[in-house]
Amino acid sequence: MLPGHEIEEAEDLAGALELLAEGHYDCVLLDLNLPDGNGLELLLRLQEAETAQPPVIVLTGQEEEAPVEACLQAGAQDYLIKGRFDGDGLERAIRYARERFGLAEALREQTSEVERSNVELSRFAYAASHDLQEPLRTLRAMGERLGERHADALGAQGGELLARMLGAGERMQALIADLLDLSRISTTPAQPVRVELGALFLAL
């Protein structure tokens, strides 16, 4: 039926699951009507699998949109109506399904990598912020004590330098607080809050 392709057939849902568990396949042609189940059940089982599964093309004799739409939502790449396609059409559908599936897999991998990087960055920011706060608190406390106890000895110029040092410490403290807030935003789910937009529009 498809020159250049090796085809293995399963007569029922159990047989299909067994074949998929034992070997690697480039594509699955899935009949919606199986003796011991239906194609949608197989798609849902594939979604639950921990390992990567091949792209699926649904073969159906039904023209109702609901079962086909359910299969597409469950991960099928395409569908073909029995009796309305030839060998060329099937081969084209398989090629396009594999291409779309490959692109989707690449996107999922990139998204997963970005999520891992964001988690690592958030952990680093949180740890760095905590580690930076302690020496900064000590520095500010000692500077304030120096100003309180030895203001006369410092003189005008020394007092100005000390004030600038304490001001820089306050700014750094604010930056660290902002960094901590950013790390919490990345790791804590946002809670929806009702906002009154009327005042905003009036302000604009």
Image (tube, helix red, strand yellow):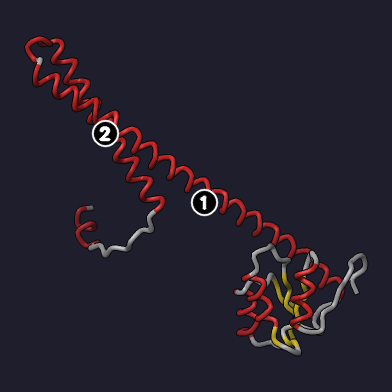
User: Which residue: 81% across, 78% down?
Assistant: 85
Q: According to the image, label 1 marks what residue?
A: 115
| Residue in the picture at 14% in, 10% down | 157
Q: Is residue 93 visible?
A: no
Q: In this view, does 122 lie above or below 29?
A: above
- Tag shown at residue 146: none
Q: Who is closer to the viewer here, 59 or 141? A: 141
x, y percent for residue 15: 79, 80
Name the amino acid, label 2: Gln
Question: Left or right: 43 with respect to 114?
Answer: right
Q: Is residue 131 above or below residue 87?
A: above
Q: Position of residue 122 (x, y in %)?
A: 43, 45
Upstream in the sequence, badge 1 or badge 2?
A: 1
Report the front residue among 50 and 46: 50
Please say if 57 is above or below 147: below
What residue is rendered at 38% in x and 55% in y?
Answer: 188
Quadrant containing the N terminus is bottom right
In which quadrant of the rendered view does residue 74 lie?
bottom right
Structural distance between the alpha carbons of marks 1 and 2: 28 Å
State the SS at label 2: helix
Q: Name the residue under label 2.
A: 173
> Quick check: 183 left or right of 195?
right
Q: What residue type is labelled 1?
A: Glu
Q: Kindly tell me whether residue 112 is visible in this rendering.
A: yes
